[in-house]
Image (spheres, rainbow, N blue to C red):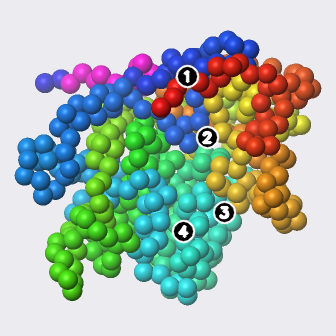
Amino acid sequence: MFFKKKYSIKNIRKYTVGIDKKVLLHNNKRVNYINFDNAASTPTLVPVLDKMNEFLEWYSNIHRGTGYKSKISTIAYEEAHDIVADFVGSDKNKNTVIFVKNTTEAINKLSYRFPLNKDDIVITTIMEHHSNDLPWRRKAKLLHTNICQDGRLDLEDLENKLKKYKGKVKLVTVTGASNVTGYINNIHYIASLAHRYGAKIMVDGAQLVPHRKVNMSGYKDDDYIDFLVFSAHKMYAPFGTGVLIGPKKFFQRGDPEYVGGGTIISVTQYNSYWADLPDKDEAGTPNIVGGIALAKVIKILNEIGMDNIKKHEKKLTEHIIKKLKEIPSVNIYSSINENIEDMVGVISFNVNGIPHNLLASVLAYEGGIGVRNGCFCAHPYIHKLLNLSSREISRLQKDLIMGNTKNIPGLVRVSFGMYNTIEEVNKFIKVLNLLVSNKKNMLKKYKYNKITGEYEPSKLPKKMFSEFSI
């Protein structure tokens, strides 16, 4: 029987929660909100909310419950693990899927479970989110792979480090796609390199999995991904679920970092025996509803087709870069090539003579456009992209420690979701051109708030930000 698809890249916008929400501008006018901050978190989808409401009527705690609802909840939660594994091409016989809160917790969990000592080496990169840098500093000697002049990963430097420290490098941990420039790393080539020199690989897929098809099993004998982490809140299920996938043999060894309910088979006064995976590493009552939401999103993404999402977001990315290049005072820190294949829809830029925090505020208060500004939890990468000297970085740190944030360097980031449109990009460009052409007036019109570290219009409506309360 022919199955007619319900969801597509052409109609997904009407299934996106809050898509027609109007927001208040500084002049008391209301406009439809434009969300270009998807790299931080995406909105959810109507069918996801519907599925959650449907499930809540059957909700109960999982495992060991003999009640009817507990049985249904257990089956659904376990099925969610299988759906996640299939989505990223993970071998369910070889790997386990562990649900946590987010990507940050997943990486930290792996850092605790990985058998490292101070003499071991972990290789990461300059372009990483702090969550894929800081956890490893506490566990082993951490080396950073350099970036090339254009901000992409220097693969030659990576291989040189693997050669030099062969036998000592236990893990190569790399982002699948940068949350600053959108650059996609060749994770399977990097996996081959890591395995060739006796190391394992972990991929931070937070920015990659929502936008590209990922295949953990690889395409050759040696280019498989050992560990993959990602978050549901960046893929239209913002309900507190993260994912850590890795070999069962790896997680069967050693003790979990969190212990307690659900992690054991038996406990006596004198000893304890761990439960099977993934229960061993999912201590306490899990976020069952969040797991169901992630599974539902994956079904929708599969129906839309990851290739269709890629094509649509590529079109948006090419269009905005073309328009930004037409504004002389704009500096783009992502790729400016006409054909963009190796990046997701993340574009970072700034405007000469306009602080990044002022630029972001003007886009919000003048156009109802949500972007993100600053260093995006990737300070070393931003320092490199901005060509800051060691002295400038040192001064910057002192200012931050002292709370002096007004002139802190940073960028403005636009990041697309599958529901964004060319029309939204054009509205963004219109507001940006308005700002650039009236730079002096905007600088006078907005004042800096030392407490929030943001620029605000001199006058704000009394009802500003009062539409929702708990």
Give x and y (percent) for residue 445: 86, 24
Disc nearest the viewer among 4 and 1: 1
- Residue to which mark 2 is pinned: 346
The CA distance from mark 2 to mark 1 is 29 Å
Res 74 seen here: yes
Residue underneath mark 1: 467
Identify residue type, mark 2. Val
Which mark is nearer the camera, 2 or 4? 4
For mark 3, what is the residue?
A: 126
Q: In this view, does 312 lie to the left or right of 402?
A: left
Of mark 2 and mark 3, the one earlier in the sequence is 3
**Type of residue at label 4?**
Pro
| Magenta span | 3-14
User: Mark 3: which amino acid?
Assistant: Ile
Labelled disc at residue 135? 4
Residue under the image location 57 percent in, 46 percent down: 342
**Precedes in sequence: disc 2 or disc 1:** 2
Is residue 2 inside the magenta stretch?
Answer: no
Q: Residue at x 54, y 57 (%)?
A: 175
108 sits left or right of 35 in the view: left
Left or right: where does residue 64 sit relative to residue 173?
left
